[in-house]
Image (cartoon, rainbow, N blue to C red):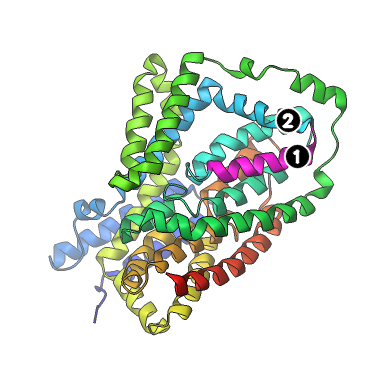
Amino acid sequence: MIKMQPIGIPILFIFIGTYLAISSEKVNRTAMAMTGMGLAGLALWVAHSIDPSQGATFTHLVETIEWQTLLFVTAMMVIVAIAGQSGMFQYIALNLARPSGGDTKRIFITFIVFVFFVSLFFDTSSTMLIIAPLTIEICKALEIDFKPYLIAESITANFASVPSLVGAVPNLVIAGETGMDAGLLFLTLMPLSIILLLVTLPILLKLFEDTMIETDSELIEEIFDVNPEVMINCRTDFFTSLIGLGILVLGFTWGVTINLEPALVAVLIGFGLLLLAHERVERIMSQVSWSTIFFLVGVFGLVGALEIVGFIDELGEAVHILVADNTGIAVVFLTWVPAALSAVIDNIPVAVVLAPIAESFAASSAIFPIVLIYAVNVGGYLLPMGAPANILAIALSEKHKDPISFAMFAKVASMIAVLHLLIGTGWLLLMSILI
């Protein structure tokens, strides 16, 4: 039987205290996560100094950090920054909105469907960094409220990401830990993701019906008379980014067949494009969200500390005892409990903590890592703080002086998340029988 080290209790308190502080929103989450990791490292070092069989050196703690995932996220942010500077996303937004003729419902549907497909190839943060600024620009130009669009887009980005290995950071973490088959993930969850889109879109349209107002025809004519090509700031960057994104998508799609890691593909494309940027490199790098990167470093470090002291192994053993080798109970447990945790903690650390448990279950059925991926992504919008996409949507609305309140977000997203968990539970139970 696995036994947690004595230093495990202080480490657990540091972990809980760090997340309580972050959840309070009274401290900077990046600074708190890194401080928490530092405190965990100090506690492990003290224990190791007293008894070399206990605790760990800081070097050992750093080695537990998911550097491959961090490189993937950084490279994707670089790609988005380069493409954004070229005017590509403004060009896409105008081309997407023009066929609607200014009909706000048609624009809403078009943007949601666009987010759905983009989420298969970009992580949720990158998807929101692409679509949210465009949405705000179009809505402001048409003099309509952009908040319903941002809420709907963040919800869609979260559930649309579930079939794709590169669709969200938790997917990469869980796949890396469990060695999950990307093809099986796609075949299992893509039909479910489409079902969720078909169910959710009418609900969102009904909920936001009062905000889908008609726009003045003269204003529509003035906006859509603009040639989309004027949005392109630099044709060289535009076509270079277009080729880079094409190669990126091909690399993600076919790379899995030859065991080419998504992080390697993203690093090659992202920093290859950056190499071509010449004198603009510093400006592009300044647009990378380094606070998000270091937040993830802190999170991975804290979870690594829990793993070193044996807490993760003990938790896995407790879960095994609880479900008693019953596949149906295990599916329900791994759907609802991680989803609830993702709502209050953030789905990335939940994925990091529970991925080893999913790996231990995977020996009996390949469905369990897939269940965990679904749970943490859907749980991410049970509450506003559960996923990076939500935080980005709220932050961008605040930047434009028309903030989305937590209550406004939760009023829509929580209800939809519960519905998605119910639908998903039924689907995953069916899949557990078939796989």
Q: What residue appears at the point 37 percent right and 18 percent down from the top-left corner?
A: 276
Circle 2 residue: 99
Position of 18 compared to 176: left or right? right
Whole-percent x and y of residue 291?
Answer: 44, 40
> Callout 1: few (<14), some (14-19), or many (20+) C-alpha neighbours within 10 Å?
some
Whole-percent x and y of residue 368?
Answer: 41, 68
Magenta segment range?
Answer: 102-118
Circle 1 residue: 106
Kindly identify the amino acid type of the residue bearing the numbered disc 1: Arg
Q: CA distance from mark 1 to mark 2?
A: 9 Å
Whole-percent x and y of residue 166?
Answer: 43, 47
> Callout 2: few (<14), some (14-19), or many (20+) C-alpha neighbours within 10 Å?
few
Kindly check if marks 1 and 2 are in contact, taking CB atoms under 8 A apart as contact: yes
Residue 389 vs residue 265, the one in the foreground: 265
Query: Is residue 380 visible to us here?
Result: no
Kindly identify the amino acid type of the residue bearing the numbered disc 2: Pro
Residue 115 part of the magenta-drawn span: yes
Residue 42 vs residue 153, the one in the foreground: 153
